[in-house]
Image (tube, rainbow, N blue to C red):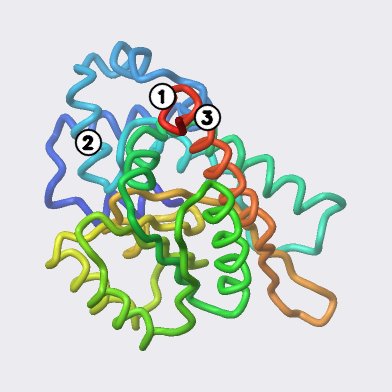
Amino acid sequence: MVLDHLINKHFEQLTENDLHIINVIRQNIDQISNMKIHDLSKLTHTSISTIHRLVKKMGFEGYSNFKFYIKMDSNNESPQLASANPIIEDVRRTVEHLEMFDYHTLNQLIETAPFIYIFGTGMAQQNVAREAQRHMLSISKRAIVINDETELRLAIDQMSADDLLFIISLSGETKNLIDPIQLIKSRELHYVSITTLHDNYIAKNAAFNVYVNSAPIQFFNTTTYYSFTPYYVVFDFIARTYHNYKINNNSFL
């Protein structure tokens, strides 16, 4: 269970109060995805701020992210034979997560970026990056797709403080990105991560992260397959959300 992994990973930072809250969450794991932070506060007899501090210790932006993470983990199973509608289920869960976000920070990052760079960590991710570029151009943002890690390093060297980088990854644990991400942080640059929903290095260090659901399925030839359809949905969602932001602020005039 992912909750146990998080406890082990961050155990030294956890207080007795934190462990009490986690124990209550474990006892009510089936209800937690629909439980508001106020309800959890009452159930654990702790303050809302204590719960906020706990989820941040475990690497989440806020309680909503933590709650959805737990829900997705409880729904995910080991690779199985393909069910009737696995892609529909992946998209549904991804959209459910997308609708929980406060996009103000992301919209501001896009708004202030003179230039947007988009990098995919593999071939399928590169295909998503090219579609993401189309979305960025559709909302009048200059965007370029970075083709490989050499170009990524060159792009980082050229990025201004307001430029924005999108990193698209399945695992979020691409070892070759450790140094570039450290360089991004040292120069106080901004990137947005698009990864599957689990605790990962790329998401942990991002200015903003978006999670997708892509549950593995096993084909007849024992190949483990991940759908990238939810990734395309993410960038469609981001573009439409930014459009609404511009309309609401009359900033397109």
Regarding mark 3 in the picture, which secondary structure is present there? Answer: helix
Query: Which numbered disc flags the more N-terminal residue, 2 or 1?
Result: 2
CA gap, disc 2 and disc 1: 35 Å
- At label 1, the amino acid type is Asn
User: Where's residue 44, x and y in %?
Assistant: 28, 19
Write down the residue under mark 1: 249
Q: Residue furthest front?
A: 253
212 over 119 or under it: above or below? above
Left or right, 4 with respect to 171, comes to: left
Q: Residues within 10 Å of mark 2 (few under 14, many from 20)?
A: many
Q: Which tag is nearer the camera, tag 1 or tag 3?
A: 1
Write down the residue under mark 3: 244
Left or right, 14 with respect to 138, comes to: left
Write down the residue under mark 2: 54
- At label 2, the amino acid type is Leu
Q: Residues within 10 Å of mark 1 (few under 14, many from 20)?
A: few
Figure quadrant of residue 164? bottom left
Point 44% across, 55% down: residue: 198
Point 46% across, 51% down: residue: 1
